[in-house]
């Protein structure tokens, strides 16, 4: 495998924390709104809505990131297997 091909694949293999951060920021707003509407009617406001939104967004962002990383890793593994099969066929033809 050439070095340029390897460098192109590297970002996909190490996508985890970046994707988690993006998902967390995107999900925090809706979860904050949800926790605010749930807690504002029943108790005094404080840290609770902020903390609830943080926990829910972190959990769902982790779940989304895990699924996305699993899909990407399986695709990369399939591409590597296909590459090795093509190389074996090339060697057998020679």
Image (cartoon, rainbow, N blue to C red):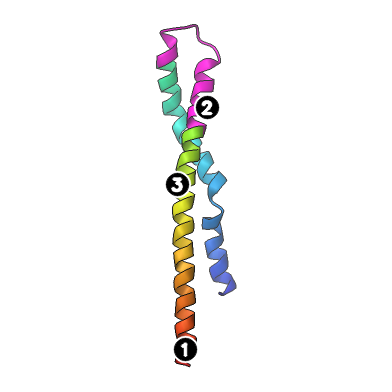
On whether residue 75 falls in the magenta region, the answer is no
* Residues drawn in magenta: 38-58
Q: Residue at x 40, y 15 (%)?
A: 37
Camera sees residue 27 = yes
In the picture of the structure, the residue carrying the numbered disc 3 is: 67
Q: Horizontal and vertical percent for residue 41? A: 41, 8
Q: Which mark is residue 2?
A: none
Q: Are marks 3 and 2 in contact (CB under 8 Å)?
A: no
Name the residue at the right extreme: 3
In the picture of the structure, the residue carrying the numbered disc 1 is: 92
Measured along the vertical axis of the image, is residue 31 above or below residue 94? above
| Badge 2: residue crowd in 10 Å (few <14, some 14–19, many ≥20) | some
Q: In terms of secondary structure, what is the magenta stretch mainly?
A: helix
Mark 2: secondary structure = helix
Camera sees residue 25 = no
Q: Are marks 3 and 1 in contact (CB under 8 Å)?
A: no
| Badge 1: residue crowd in 10 Å (few <14, some 14–19, many ≥20) | few
Q: In front: 52, or 94?
A: 94
Q: CA distance from mark 1 to mark 2?
A: 56 Å
Measured along the vertical axis of the image, is residue 23 above or below residue 93? above
Q: Which mark is residue 54?
A: 2
Q: Horizontal and vertical percent for residue 74? A: 46, 58
Mark 1: secondary structure = helix
Q: Residue at x 47, y 89 (%)?
A: 92
Disc 3 versus disc 2: nearer the observer: 3
Q: Residue at x 59, y 71 (%)?
A: 3
Disc 3 versus disc 1: nearer the observer: 1
Q: Horizontal and vertical percent for residue 4? A: 56, 70
């Amino acid at each position: 495998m050439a070095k340029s091909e390897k460098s192109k694949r590297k970002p996909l293999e190490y996508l985890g924390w970046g994707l988690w951060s993006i998902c967390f920021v995107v999900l925090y707003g809706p979860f904050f709104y949800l926790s605010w509407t749930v807690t504002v009617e029943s108790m005094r406001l404080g840290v609770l809505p902020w903390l609830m939104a943080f926990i829910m967004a972190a959990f769902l962002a982790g779940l989304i990131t895990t699924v996305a990383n699993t899909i990407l890793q399986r695709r990369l593994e399939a591409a590597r297997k296909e590459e090795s099969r093509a190389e074996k066929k090339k060697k057998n033809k020679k």
